[in-house]
Image (tube, rainbow, N blue to C red):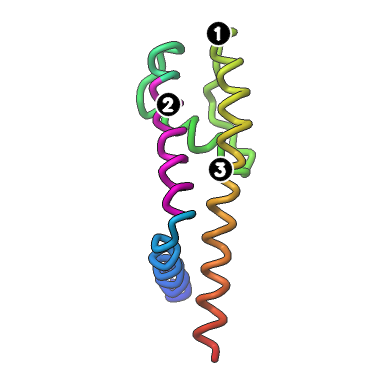
Amino acid sequence: MISFFLTAARLLKALGKAMARPVFQSLLLTLFLILLSGTLFYTQVEGWHVLDAVYFGVVSLIPTGVETGVSPSTSTGKIFTMMYLLVGVGIMISLLAMIAKEVINYNIENKQ
């Protein structure tokens, strides 16, 4: 349990450093806008509840392979989802890579 809290502390400190970078800020804003557009689309076109739409949007962009239990049923929804994933996955991976880089840099700095 202690190792979890130490890891969480390192992650939060790395996130703090990453937030100082303009590139990270722009990626985070872009990801927020992508998630917002996906949530609005799925609630309006597919008729999903907001929580289902947000959950689908987030889990779809994280490369984990988690089954969401929801999927678009309209042709418009399927086309939107393909475009959403093509754009969103790239942004999400870039953001996760920047966070990983900051965690690694934080670990290297604190070992010296």
Considering every residue shown, the one lying at the far left of the view is 50
What are the residue bounds of the magenta stretch?
A: 24-40
- 3 or 2: tag closer to the N-terminus: 2
User: SS at mark 3?
Assistant: helix
User: SS at mark 2?
Assistant: helix
Residue at (47%, 74%) from the top-left corner?
3
Residue indicated by mark 3: 91
- Of the residues shown, which amino acid type is indicated by label 1? Thr
- Label 2 crowd (10 A; few <14 / some 14-19 / many >=20): some
72 vs 76, nearest the viewer:
76
Q: Nearer the viewer, mark 2 or mark 1?
A: 2
Q: Position of residue 40 (x, y in %)?
A: 38, 22
Q: How many marks?
A: 3
Residue at (43%, 56%) from the top-left corner?
22
Residue indicated by mark 2: 37
Contact flag, marks 3 and 2 (Cβ < 8 Å): no
Horizontal side of residue 86 vs 54, given as left or right: right
